Image: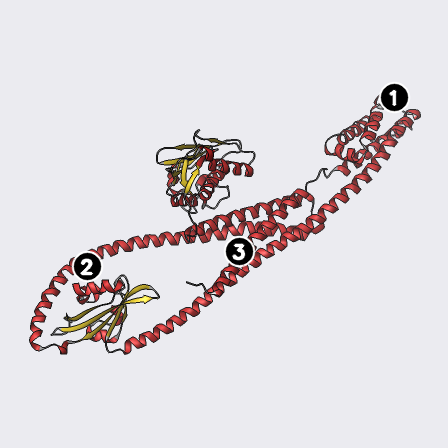
């Protein structure tokens, strides 16, 4: 069956829009990582302040000593000024200020001058009125310090402004690229929305065409002199023309949607039932001279019934029955015999129909209850899905938008620390949005049956080791241990799906356990199955919530405050069951959890060369 070119183009357009959406997300994430890395600075903000305070204390000490030698009143104890100067020099000689001075080439000069200043301490005790020589010595020791500090302040300011300007230019360029990526994401989403509206409009036009065709068909059926009725696979009436009302005294409103058994016992006669089953199976049939006793008629009628399958292309969707009244064609001498035979047959059929109708009614009620329960489950699923998408997608996008707008509004006034902080927030929002999109797409592919399972014998230990290595790349600081038997067991599975399941279980173990606690994997096997138990010592799950863990969108009360969608465990169990396996759980609140992946064991052995 050939697919129309327009449909192929439409599918391609949708895929291209989705690919653009993902590409913009990845690009924005990369640019945010680069911006966050470039915003790291080596010096603290108070460099110029420390230099200025040190220079100020040197001048104040010089002035205080001079006033004391001249016999004038001073504004404080010059010993206190000397101690303040030493504390400022100590601050310059330690931490980031020392690194900056060393980079600017003033570290050695500062150390030499500091030694000279500290040598003044014995001299300070002899300073009093008339001690002009001592005051001159103090001034001679402090003048080089003030001069050096002035040059250091100028050099530090120039270096800081040069570095800050370059980083701000790079950050501004990256921010505009991120804004362009967000605009691209919005455009891709808008294009997908337009495609959806176009599809809805096309569907509405198709429905209108079908409605007109149905009205025309009803006109043709209603104009026929023979009785015509159509049924679906549940033996319910879908078409009932006026000629049928003259044959069976039931209005079209009563007949449409009703079962054949409720319309008339005629359709429960064995021959008619067989012919109906044959028509629903795709083969035409006929019941000639079928006797029928209308409720409002004194005499029996003889009906010719022609059965034909109702097709939609190659598929049988129901059956159509043509009914013709042939009573006048029967001879009078045969009427009584036919009447008696038909009466006995009809009485037996109605007796059996009473029991069958009772059973059918009970079965129908049970089917309706099951259908109602399924419908409730589906409705709850879509309400939960819509609520999750509305909240989870809106939150990271709001974080990204608010932080980017803040950076754009402030422009050159943004400090490097604020840029790094807001870039980290944007990066976190995009990472969360990316994971949410991936989880939602995986769940959608599973629900639509688009996930293919390719079973093959696989080294289960190697699959677990690969999953552990990938998790260590994401969380290098976490301890993840793997315990496996000496002979690697073989599992009959799809390796890509198994890696996906193990990645989900490992990610949950790392996310819901303390950073200093290990995550353990234990592999075991028996004659029929292979198992991998993932154990953590995290928050655990209360016993009354364990049966709900594998329900889509359900999150345990102990997971409060930890980001998540509630899709991963449901997806993992579904993927395991597609491979003939399962995922089980054992957990205690505050003690940790153990999730076990069980898969069928392959009935083949690995050759020694292949194992190596």
Residue shown at 14% from the left, 78% from the top? 329
Q: Position of residue 520 (x, y in %)?
A: 47, 32
Location of the N terminus by quadrant is bottom left
Q: Position of residue 488 (x, y in %)?
A: 43, 32
Per the model, the C-alpha gap separating discs 2 and 3 is: 53 Å
Q: Note whether residue 77 is visible.
A: no
| In the image: residue 594, left or right of residue 282 | right
Up/down of 57 relative to 241, above or below:
above
Residue shown at 69% from the left, 45% from the top? 415
- The residue identified by callout 3 is 18
For mark 3, give the secondary structure: helix
- The residue identified by callout 1 is 126
| In the image: residue 35, left or right of residue 489 | right
Could you say which quadrant of the image residue 146 lies in? top right
Query: Which numbered disc covers residue 357?
Result: 2
- Counting other residues with Cα less than 10 Å from the Cα at mark 1, is it few (<14), some (14-19), or many (20 or more)? few
Labels 2, 3: front one: 3
Per the model, the C-alpha gap separating discs 3 and 1 is: 84 Å
Could you say which quadrant of the image residue 323 lies in? bottom left
- Counting other residues with Cα less than 10 Å from the Cα at mark 2, is it few (<14), some (14-19), or many (20 or more)? some
First of labels 2, 1 by sequence position: 1
First of labels 2, 3 by sequence position: 3
Per the model, the C-alpha gap separating discs 2 and 1 is: 123 Å
Labels 2, 1: front one: 2
- Counting other residues with Cα less than 10 Å from the Cα at mark 3, is it few (<14), some (14-19), or many (20 or more)? some
Up/down of 434 relative to 5, above or below:
above
């Amino acid at each position: 069956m050939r697919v129309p070119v327009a449909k192929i183009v439409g599918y391609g357009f949708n895929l291209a829009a989705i690919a653009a959406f993902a590409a913009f997300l990845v690009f924005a994430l990369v640019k945010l990582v680069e911006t966050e890395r470039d915003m790291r600075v080596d010096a603290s903000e108070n460099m110029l302040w420390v230099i200025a305070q040190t220079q100020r204390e040197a001048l104040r000490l010089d002035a205080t000593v001079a006033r004391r030698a001249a016999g004038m009143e001073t504004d404080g104890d010059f010993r206190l000024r000397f101690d303040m100067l030493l504390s400022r020099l100590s601050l310059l000689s330690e931490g980031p200020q020392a690194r900056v001075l060393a980079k600017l080439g003033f570290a050695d000069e500062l150390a030499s001058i500091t030694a000279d200043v500290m040598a003044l301490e014995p001299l300070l005790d002899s300073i009093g009125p008339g001690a002009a020589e001592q005051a001159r010595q103090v001034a001679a020791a402090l003048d080089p310090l003030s001069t050096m500090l002035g040059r250091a302040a100028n050099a530090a300011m120039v270096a800081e402004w040069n570095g800050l300007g370059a980083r701000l230019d790079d950050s501004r360029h990256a921010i505009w690229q991120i804004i362009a990526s967000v605009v691209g994401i919005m455009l891709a989403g808008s294009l997908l929305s337009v495609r959806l509206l176009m599809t809805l409009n096309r569907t509405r036009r198709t429905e209108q065409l079908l409605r007109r065709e149905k009205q025309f068909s009803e006109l043709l059926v209603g104009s026929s002199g023979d009785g015509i009725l159509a049924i679906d696979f549940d033996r319910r009436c879908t078409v009932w023309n006026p000629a049928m009302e003259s044959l069976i005294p039931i209005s079209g409103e009563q007949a449409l949607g009703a079962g054949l058994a409720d319309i008339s016992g005629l359709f429960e006669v064995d021959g008619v039932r067989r012919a109906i089953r044959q028509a629903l199976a795709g083969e035409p049939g006929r019941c000639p001279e079928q006797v029928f006793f209308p409720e409002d008629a004194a005499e029996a009628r003889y009906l010719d019934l022609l059965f034909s399958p109702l097709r939609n292309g190659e598929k049988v969707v129901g059956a159509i029955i043509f009914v013709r009244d042939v009573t006048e064609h029967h001879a009078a001498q045969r009427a009584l015999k036919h009447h008696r035979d038909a009466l006995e047959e009809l009485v037996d059929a109605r007796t059996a129909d009473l029991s069958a109708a009772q059973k059918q009614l009970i079965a129908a009620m049970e089917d309706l209850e099951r259908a109602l329960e399924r419908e409730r489950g589906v409705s709850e699923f879509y309400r939960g899905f819509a609520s999750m998408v509305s909240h989870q997608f809106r939150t990271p996008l709001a974080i990204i938008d608010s932080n980017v707008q803040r950076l754009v509004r402030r422009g050159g006034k943004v400090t490097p620390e604020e840029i790094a902080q807001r870039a980290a927030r944007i990066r976190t929002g995009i990472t969360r949005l990316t994971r949410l999109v991936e989880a939602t797409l995986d769940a959608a592919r599973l629900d639509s049956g688009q996930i293919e399972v390719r079973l093959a014998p696989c080294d289960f230990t190697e699959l677990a080791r690969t999953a552990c290595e990938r998790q260590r790349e994401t969380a290098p600081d976490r301890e993840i241990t793997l315990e496996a038997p000496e002979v690697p067991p073989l599992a009959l599975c799809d390796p890509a799906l198994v890696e996906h399941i193990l990645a989900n279980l490992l990610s949950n173990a790392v996310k819901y356990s303390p950073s200093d606690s290990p995550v353990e994997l234990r592999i075991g096997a028996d004659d029929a199955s292979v198992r991998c138990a993932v154990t953590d010592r995290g928050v655990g799950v209360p016993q009354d919530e364990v049966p709900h863990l594998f329900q889509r969108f359900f999150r345990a009360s102990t997971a409060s405050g930890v980001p998540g969608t509630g899709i991963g465990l449901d997806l993992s169990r579904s993927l395991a069951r597609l491979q003939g396996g399962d995922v089980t759980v054992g957990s205690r609140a505050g003690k940790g959890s153990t999730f076990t992946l069980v898969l069928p064991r392959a009935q083949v052995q690995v050759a020694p060369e292949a194992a190596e």
